[in-house]
């Protein structure tokens, strides 16, 4: 079913991007929403109070907690508030709601009810870490939190062994060393990465290097704070045309035209169609 953006109405769910650490990163739209929203749903009321104080804003609406452990129970009430014409501002402890933080269920429920949703763009640990990592940014994927259990984590890492996009994910500081100990044998110690700790905060730290170097760094420390890991893309060697010529001949034997066969194999392996075509003709002589 195609999702249609509803007509503007009095009720709206606002997703507010909250500073990761530095209050100066707050947008003017977030400041206004904190002061004027009818309801403010937040992970931690103490952090909300601190943020409002730092911004010199008085929260004018009703404040409710909206955490991972009560998200399911609280979502229907927020939907009814929006349906009744209220402006509901949803914020987390830092970053963008619904991105590995509470919020997705509220968004989905409001969409199902045909209600209006708006976003107040703001900080994101994912993009901030990607930007400062020094790793390729043209293609990337976000994996949320790394698996907690050892076996699941190793399986997950094996799946990333051939990932050609830069990968961003979150990790607990107490599991970071174990993650790197698994990553080196699964991905290779030469794979590039970056560990981003406490982004935008007073003790911000970004460590860049090979996975072997990052493991050596982690073994000598007990890192604290919020951790975002950026993993560089896998470097996959491009095969020589001569190595793939037999695959092209196999497709030709199945009835494909020679150039079509060369093009299909070339696109699959990142090899020139002409080089494959010439190599297949040479092999068939």
Image (cartoon, rainbow, N blue to C red):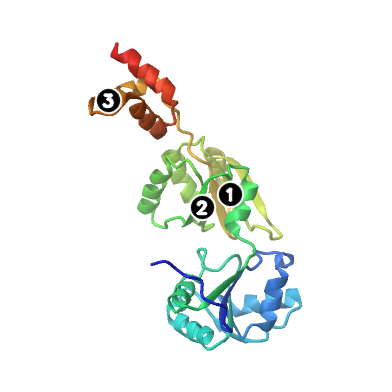
Task: Let me know if residue 224 appears in the view.
Answer: no
**SS for dot 2:** helix
Circle 2 sits on which residue?
176
- Cα separation, mark 2 vs mark 1, equals 9 Å
Residue 118, picture quadrant: bottom right
Q: Residue at x 40, y 29 (%)?
A: 266
Circle 3 sits on which residue?
252
Q: Nearer the viewer, residue 51 or 17?
A: 17
Q: Residue at x 55, y 75 (%)?
A: 43
Residue 257 left/right relative to 278? left
Nearest-to-viewer mark from 2 and 1: 1
**SS for dot 3:** helix
Up the image or down, 83 lies above or below 239; here it is below
The label number, if any, that marks residue 195 in the structure image = 1
Residue 24 left/right relative to 8? right
Residue 180 left/right relative to 91? left
Up the image or down, 216 lies above or below 283; here it is below
């Amino acid at each position: 079913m195609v999702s249609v953006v509803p007509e503007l109405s009095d009720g709206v769910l606002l997703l507010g991007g909250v500073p990761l650490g530095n209050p100066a990163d707050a947008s003017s739209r977030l400041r206004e929403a904190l002061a004027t929203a009818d309801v403010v749903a937040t992970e931690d009321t103490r952090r909300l109070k601190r943020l409002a104080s730092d911004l010199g804003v008085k929260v004018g609406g009703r404040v409710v907690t909206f955490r991972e452990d009560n998200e399911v129970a609280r979502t229907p009430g927020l939907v009814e508030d929006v349906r009744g014409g209220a402006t509901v501002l949803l914020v987390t402890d830092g970053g963008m709601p619904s991105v590995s933080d509470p919020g997705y269920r509220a968004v989905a429920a409001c969409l199902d009810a045909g209600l209006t949703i708006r976003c107040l763009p703001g900080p994101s640990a994912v993009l901030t870490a990607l930007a400062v990592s020094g790793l390729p940014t043209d293609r990337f994927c976000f994996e949320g939190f790394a698996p907690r259990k050892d076996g699941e984590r190793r399986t997950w890492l094996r799946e990333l062994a051939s990932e050609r996009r830069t990968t961003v994910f979150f990790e607990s500081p107490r599991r970071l060393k174990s993650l790197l100990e698994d990553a080196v044998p699964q991905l290779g110690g030469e794979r590039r990465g970056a560990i981003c700790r406490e982004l935008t905060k007073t003790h911000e730290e970004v460590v860049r290097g090979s996975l072997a170097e990052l493991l050596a760094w982690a073994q000598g420390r007990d890192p604290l704070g919020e951790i975002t890991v950026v993993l560089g893309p896998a470097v996959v060697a491009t095969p020589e045309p001569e190595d793939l010529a037999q695959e092209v001949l196999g497709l030709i034997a199945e009835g494909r035209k020679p150039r079509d066969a060369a093009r299909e194999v070339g696109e699959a392996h990142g090899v020139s169609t002409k080089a494959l075509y010439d190599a297949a003709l040479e092999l068939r002589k």
